[in-house]
Structures are given as structure tokens and as C-alpha cells.
């Protein structure tokens, strides 16, 4: 019998309207066959949960528990547990579920059959808490009971199979997940009408697996089948239709088809705003999805607006420390990260982490994600050791809670590798990135985009080690995967072309580099908004080629276009604007317009000093560039002052054998050379050489450069035998590491005649 509604008017006010009665009756009719043991009164509370009225559901069940009448107390406790679970209060939910289970099993005749639902709910909580092995134990117990008490093709069995599939999906065991989803679908297709919503749900789940495997076209096929069923069986504006549209939007998002994704997300939002309360969690999710599209398109202001609307919706409906609020804070932090507002981003990331550490198990993957994101901020701030601490905490959590070959662990290892790359610890960087690649190659399809990313990261390390042929080999493997998996104009293909261009740039093959940079730009201009930051980066890279070809006017033109985009799309003090100013300064430097070069370098330094820590490596670079201008102006004492400031920062923030420290030592030596102070010049050149020999491969061009500088000093001192000795070492390295027609090889090959003549 239904409960006494006295005192419940605030909870059940929706039932007072015709529309409310219609919704309730429709829901109960739809679920009555599947929840045969559940009373209408309890089912109504579950309906409140399903429409996002978690607080009202909690109040309703609490009142019902105090005045149960003839209602089943175990079911009421289970319903109340569901309300707490949906509010993110997992400990309380587990407590209530366990009470319900004990009540069922301690009766004179244990209610084993009914207990399967409670065990299933307990498993759901453990799955949300990322305690996947424990969740599987409960799901398996529930499934075993259902298989004993229901026909093999019963819908309860299908539901158990579905959630076991979801757990394996969370564990990244995609083949096992797919097997369970397909078993569930088979039951549903056998027992339900062809257009039943549960069949659509199974198709959605299978699509999700293909998404995880990077098979986006196949995923899209299943999502569209799901939508087709949903549109046939439900009203056009049913919330389930909105979910299908959102999933199709996700598929287009993964394919970088942002405009189509946005179209589906907006259709989904329109339905949800029409059919659901204004503060329903699904509306918050729609805002979040739309924000993500604007983020991908580099339109950070509208993205921030939608993320904030999502957060506002969640804060209205959920407890202040709900995990979904942590997710919103995390997303907003990501926008500030892209805008270069690192301190603000860090504030939001830490707020998100605080909630997750409070509400989730200590080894939850979301906590690991927060630590990972904070590490990314410290990386941008040049605090590489601090970044490593957070990355390592993140990987420890994931290694504790996930299988050792889980793709999320591969991501953590990749991040640690990149942190070591930033510290110029290339061998350790390579070790971590190779471990990451090994996991991905084991767990993912051979042409998965994440494998392409690993190959790309390894290529980047070989690039830094100046092993350009090896780097090129990895970049081309990465490109091959991307060209196989993506449309020809996908942004990831543009990134690969850009990276390959960088190799040809370093090899001095400027025409070939220019060809790849322009192909990359063409894709970006086709697929991205005209003022997207990635287009600015492409323009900047093309400018670099013209700079190397001494075509300074064209270089200036491209750099100014790049700067114009960045000034339009980014905050005035964004680090990328500082980089553009720095590049323009370099052109004026080459044109011997030292005053204008100094003006741009000082503007760049001003931004960096405002936005970055005082000892950030980028500030050291700006100070170094200004020193170079004073050097060219013949103001050697002032140049020396700036070079030493730069060195001081680098020695404080970077490992003792970092290549940038070698560069600073080299520059200081150059000043002493100009001042005819050859002994201190030789001392600094030798210190620079020592650093480079320690941190770089034995045949790196920078080592050849150091040897060549020492040649110059011994030549000036008249010690020609020693000069010739260093010269031969320099030439030997250069001939090994650079093409025979490279301008440096040509120069050094001609140089020995001067030395031999001097001897």
C-alpha cells in the first residue's frame, strides 16, 4: 500500500500536476515488470532519483522509513542508499545497503533472490569509487543469484552483465567488457521488443568500447543505431533521446569534427532544458560538453562561460564537496591553464583535489588526475622537480588501483618522461616513454591514437638529443598511424607534419621543412577558427624558416600575423605573446636594428616577469637575449651583467648539466673573448664543453660548437697545435651529425687551411 503522504507535500509536489502524474504513471508502468518485488511507494522514490531530485528522494525515503506502514523496510533502506549514492555520499550509501542486505538475509527465510539487487547496488558504489575488483566480487555474487533464480535470458541477468562490462571497461579490459555487453545485448534483443530503450542502452555501451579502442567510425555506427531505436520508441523530446544525441556528439568530438559535435550537443541541451528541471545534473553535463568543444576550438572565453554555468548548476543541486563539483573546478582550471593564468589554474586544481581527497578513496583515479594536472602547472612554471613529485604521486595511485598495464598508467609514465625531458635528463625520459609505449602497444589496437602519441613523445626526446634521423623515424611512424585512423585534415595530422618539419629545420633542410610547415598550416586553417592559437603556432614556425633563410622581411610578416592572433585570443600578458615578441626581436636583431630588437625583448621580459616566477627558465632566456643585443652594440660590460643574471637563474632552477647552462657559460666566454680576456674566456668555454659532454650524446653538434670556440681561443693565444687538435675533434663530430652539404660542415671543412698556415 502507498505510504501516508501527510507531511510530504514538499517532496511529492510534482505529483500534484497532471504532467507530474503522467510522468510518474509512465515510469511505474515501464519499470513494474522488472521490479516485481518493489512497491509503488518505493518505486516513486526511485523515480525521484532518476529525475535528479536527490534531496527530495532522500527526504521521501527518510519519512517513509520513519513511517513504513506495511512497506518493506529493506527496500526503503536500499532506496535511501541510492539517494545517498547519487549525491556522492558513498560511505553512507554503503552503510544503508549493508543494513538492507542484513535485514533480508537475517529473516526466518533468507530472501536470497531479493538480495541480488542490494548486492548489485553495493557493487555500483564500489565501481564509482574505482574499487573495481571489489565491485566485480559483488556483481558476480549478484549475477550468480540471478542466474539461479531467474531464467537465463531474464532482464536482471542482462543488467548484471552490463554492469560487469562497465567495470571491465573501467579497468581498460575492453575485450572482456565487449563480451559482457554483447551477452547483455543478445538477451535484450531476444526478450524485448526491437525498439526497447534497453536495447538502445546496450548499443550505446558497445559504442563506448569502440570509442575507447579509438574506432570512432564503428562507435558512431552503434550510437546511430541506438538513436534510431530511441526515436522510434520514445517521444522526440525524451531525455534518453538527449543522451543519444550527446553520445553522437562525443563521437564527432573524438573525430575532431567540432562543428558537428556542437550541433548534436546543442540539440541534446535543448531537449534537456525542455524536459528536466533547470538544475538537473544532465543539463550541467550538456553545458560541460559544449564547453569542451569551445575549448578544443581554442575559444576559451565561451568555453569558460559554459563551464561556469555547469558548475553553477551542480553547486545548486549537489553538496559542496560532491565529486562532480570537483570535476567542474578541474575543467575551469584547464581554461585558465590554456590562457596562461597558471596561478589561477593552480588555485582551481587544488580546490578540485581537496574535494577529491576528502570524498574519494585515497587511491581513486580522479585524485591521480588532479595530481597530474597540478604537475602540469608546475611544469609550465618551470618548477620541474615539483612537477615530478606530483606526477610520481599520481602514478603511485594508479599503480595501486589499476592493473599494471592499464592505459592510464601509460599516460602517467609518459608525463613523467616528459618531465625528465624538460630537465634534459633524456635517458630517463626515454625509459619512461618507452614503458608507456610498451603498455599501449600491449593493450590497444596497433593503430590507436595513443600509440601515435607515444611515438611522438619518443621522437621528441631523440630530437632533443639531436639524433634527428631517429627522431624522424618515430615522427613518421606516428604520422602513419594518424593518417590511417583520421581524415586527411585532422588536427593531429597537422601536428605530425609540424613535428617532421622541425626535424628538417634542424637538419638545415629549410625548403623541405617549409613544405611540411605549410601543409600543417593548410590543415589548421581548414579545420580550426582563423584565430586559433595553433594557427598562430604554424605561422610562427614558418617565420622561423624564413628567418633561417635570411628572408627577414617575410619572417617578420609571419611573426606579426602570429602575434596578431595571440593578442586577439589570449590575455595581454600570456607567455605565448611574450614568445612572439621575442621572435620579432630576433628578426630586428638580425637586421641589425638593435634598438627595436631591445624594445621587443624588453616587452617580452616584462610579460614574463609579471606572469612567471622570478627564476623561471623563460625569464633567463629573455635576459640572455637582451645580453646578446648589448653584445652586438659593443656594450660588453652590460652584456656580461645580463648573461650572468641569466646564468644565475639557470644554475638555480636547472640541473647542473642542463644544456641551457652550457649555453650561458658559452655566452659569457664570448664576452671575455671580445674583451681580449682569453684566460677567463677559455675557462668558461671549457666549463661549457664539460656540461655538454656530460648531458649530450658524444656526437652532438653543440659539442662540436664548444670545441670550435676553444679552437678560436687557442688560435688567438698562438697555441696552434692545440687549436688544430680541438679543430679535428670538432670537424669529426660535425661530419657525423650533419649532412655533408650543411653550411656548418662547409665552413669547418674550409677552416683548417688557416690553422695549418698559422702552424
Image: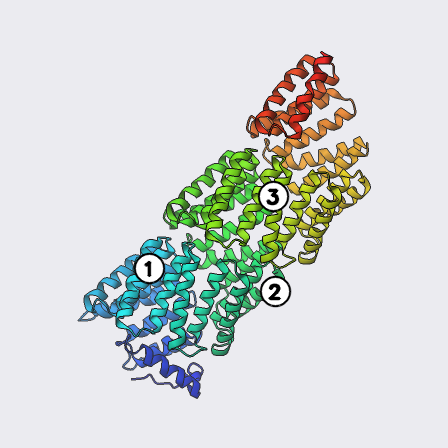
Graded by Cα atoms within 10 Å as few (under 14), some (14 to 19) or many (20 or more), the crowding at tag 2 reads: some
Say whether residue 720 is visible: yes
Image-quadrant location for residue 425: top right
Q: Earlier in the sequence, mark 2 or mark 1?
A: 1
Label of residue 302 in the image: 2
- Towards the viewer: 594 or 517: 517
Q: Is residue 315 left or right of residue 156?
A: right
Residue shown at the point (50%, 53%) measured from the top left: 370
Q: Which residue is mark 1?
A: 165
Of circles 1 and 3, the one toward us is 1
CA distance for labels 1 and 3: 42 Å
Indicate the position of residue 421 as horizontal and vertical percent values: 54, 39
CA distance for labels 2 and 1: 36 Å
Q: Earlier in the sequence, mark 1 or mark 3?
A: 1
Q: Which residue is mark 3?
A: 382
- Towards the viewer: 691 or 359: 691
CA distance for labels 3 and 2: 29 Å
Q: Is residue 204 left or right of residue 532?
A: left
Amino acid at each position: 500500500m502507498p505510504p501516508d503522504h501527510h507531511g510530504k507535500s514538499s517532496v511529492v509536489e510534482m505529483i500534484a500536476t497532471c504532467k507530474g502524474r503522467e510522468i510518474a504513471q509512465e515510469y511505474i508502468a515501464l519499470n513494474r515488470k522488472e521490479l516485481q518485488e518493489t512497491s509503488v511507494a518505493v518505486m516513486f522514490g526511485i523515480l525521484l532519483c532518476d529525475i535528479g531530485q536527490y534531496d527530495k528522494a532522500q527526504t521521501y525515503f527518510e519519512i517513509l522509513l520513519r513511517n513504513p506502514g506495511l512497506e518493506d523496510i529493506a527496500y526503503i533502506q536500499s532506496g535511501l542508499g541510492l539517494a545517498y549514492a547519487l549525491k556522492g555520499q558513498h560511505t553512507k550509501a554503503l552503510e544503508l545497503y549493508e543494513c538492507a542486505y542484513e535485514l533480508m538475509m537475517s529473516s526466518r527465510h533468507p530472501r536470497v533472490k531479493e538480495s541480488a539487487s542490494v548486492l548489485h547496488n553495493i557493487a555500483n558504489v564500489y565501481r564509482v569509487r574505482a574499487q573495481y575488483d571489489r565491485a566485480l566480487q559483488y556483481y558476480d555474487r549478484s549475477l550468480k543469484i540471478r542466474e539461479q533464480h531467474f531464467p537465463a535470458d531474464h532482464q536482471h541477468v542482462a543488467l548484471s552483465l552490463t554492469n560487469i562490462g562497465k567495470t571491465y571497461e573501467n579497468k581498460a579490459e575492453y575485450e572482456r567488457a565487449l563480451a559482457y555487453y554483447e551477452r547483455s545485448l543478445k538477451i535484450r534483443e531476444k526478450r524485448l521488443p526491437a525498439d526497447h530503450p534497453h536495447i538502445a542502452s546496450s548499443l550505446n555501451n558497445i559504442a563506448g568500447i569502440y570509442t575507447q579502442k579509438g574506432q570512432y567510425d564503428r562507435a558512431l555506427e552503434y550510437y546511430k543505431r541506438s538513436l534510431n531505436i530511441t526515436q522510434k520508441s520514445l517521444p522526440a523530446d525524451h531525455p534518453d533521446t538527449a543522451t543519444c544525441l550527446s553520445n553522437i556528439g562525443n563521437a564527432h568530438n573524438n573525430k575532431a569534427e567540432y562543428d558537428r559535435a556542437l550541433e548534436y550537443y546543442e540539440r541534446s541541451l535543448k531537449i534537456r532544458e525542455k524536459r528536466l528541471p533547470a538544475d538537473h545534473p544532465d543539463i550541467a553535463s550538456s553545458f560541460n560538453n559544449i564547453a569542451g568543444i569551445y575549448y578544443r576550438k581554442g575559444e576559451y572565453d565561451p568555453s569558460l562561460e559554459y563551464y561556469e554555468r555547469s558548475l553553477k548548476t551542480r553547486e545548486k543541486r549537489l553538496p559542496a564537496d560532491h565529486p562532480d563539483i570537483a570535476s567542474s573546478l578541474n575543467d575551469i582550471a584547464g581554461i585558465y591553464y590554456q590562457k596562461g593564468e597558471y596561478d589561477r589554474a593552480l588555485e582551481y586544481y587544488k580546490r578540485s583535489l581537496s574535494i577529491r581527497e576528502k570524498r574519494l578513496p585515497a587511491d581513486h583515479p580522479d585524485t591521480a588526475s588532479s595530481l597530474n594536472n597540478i604537475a602540469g602547472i608546475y611544469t609550465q612554471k618551470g618548477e620541474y622537480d615539483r612537477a615530478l613529485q606530483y606526477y610520481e604521486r599520481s602514478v603511485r595511485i594508479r599503480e595501486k588501483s589499476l592493473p599494471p598495464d592499464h592505459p592510464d598508467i601509460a599516460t602517467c609514465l609518459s608525463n613523467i618522461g616528459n618531465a625528465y625531458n624538460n630537465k634534459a635528463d633524456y635517458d630517463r625520459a626515454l625509459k619512461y616513454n618507452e614503458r608507456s609505449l610498451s603498455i599501449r602497444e600491449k593493450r590497444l589496437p596497433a593503430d590507436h591514437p595513443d600509440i601515435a602519441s607515444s611515438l611522438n613523445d619518443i621522437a621528441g626526446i631523440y630530437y632533443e638529443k639531436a639524433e634527428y634521423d631517429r627522431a624522424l623515424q618515430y615522427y613518421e611512424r606516428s604520422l602513419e598511424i594518424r593518417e590511417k585512423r583520421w581524415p586527411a585534415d585532422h588536427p593531429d595530422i597537422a601536428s605530425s607534419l609540424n613535428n617532421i618539419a622541425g626535424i628538417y629545420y634542424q637538419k638545415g633542410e629549410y625548403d623541405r621543412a617549409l613544405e611540411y610547415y605549410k601543409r600543417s598550416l593548410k590543415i589548421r586553417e581548414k579545420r580550426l577558427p582563423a584565430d586559433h592559437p595553433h594557427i598562430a603556432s604554424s605561422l610562427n614556425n614558418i617565420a622561423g624558416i624564413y628567418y633561417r633563410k635570411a628572408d627577414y622581411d617575410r619572417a617578420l610578416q609571419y611573426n606579426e600575423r602570429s602575434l596578431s592572433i595571440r593578442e586577439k585570443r589570449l590575455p595581454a600578458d600570456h607567455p605565448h605573446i611574450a614568445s612572439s615578441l621575442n621572435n620579432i626581436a630576433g628578426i630586428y636583431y638580425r637586421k641589425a636594428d638593435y634598438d627595436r630588437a631591445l624594445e621587443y625583448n624588453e616587452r617580452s621580459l616584462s610579460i614574463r616577469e609579471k606572469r612567471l616566477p622570478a627564476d623561471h627558465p623563460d625569464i633567463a632566456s629573455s635576459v640572455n637575449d637582451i645580453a646578446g643585443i648589448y653584445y652586438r652594440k659593443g656594450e660588453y660590460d652590460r652584456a656580461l651583467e645580463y648573461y650572468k643574471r641569466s646564468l644565475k637563474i639557470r644554475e638555480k632552477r636547472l640541473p647542473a648539466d642542463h644544456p641551457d647552462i652550457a649555453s650561458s657559460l658559452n655566452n659569457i666566454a664570448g664576452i671575455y673573448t671580445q674583451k681580449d680576456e682569453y684566460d677567463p674566456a677559455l675557462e668558461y668555454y671549457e666549463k661549457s664543453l664539460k656540461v655538454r659532454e656530460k648531458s649530450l650524446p658524444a656526437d652532438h653538434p653543440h659539442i662540436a660548437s664548444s670545441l670550435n670556440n676553444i679552437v678560436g681561443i687557442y688560435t688567438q693565444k698562438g697555441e696552434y697545435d692545440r687549436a688544430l687538435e680541438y679543430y679535428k675533434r670538432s670537424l669529426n663530430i660535425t661530419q657525423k651529425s650533419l649532412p655533408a652539404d650543411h653550411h656548418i660542415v662547409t665552413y669547418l671543412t674550409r677552416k683548417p687551411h688557416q690553422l695549418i698556415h698559422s702552424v
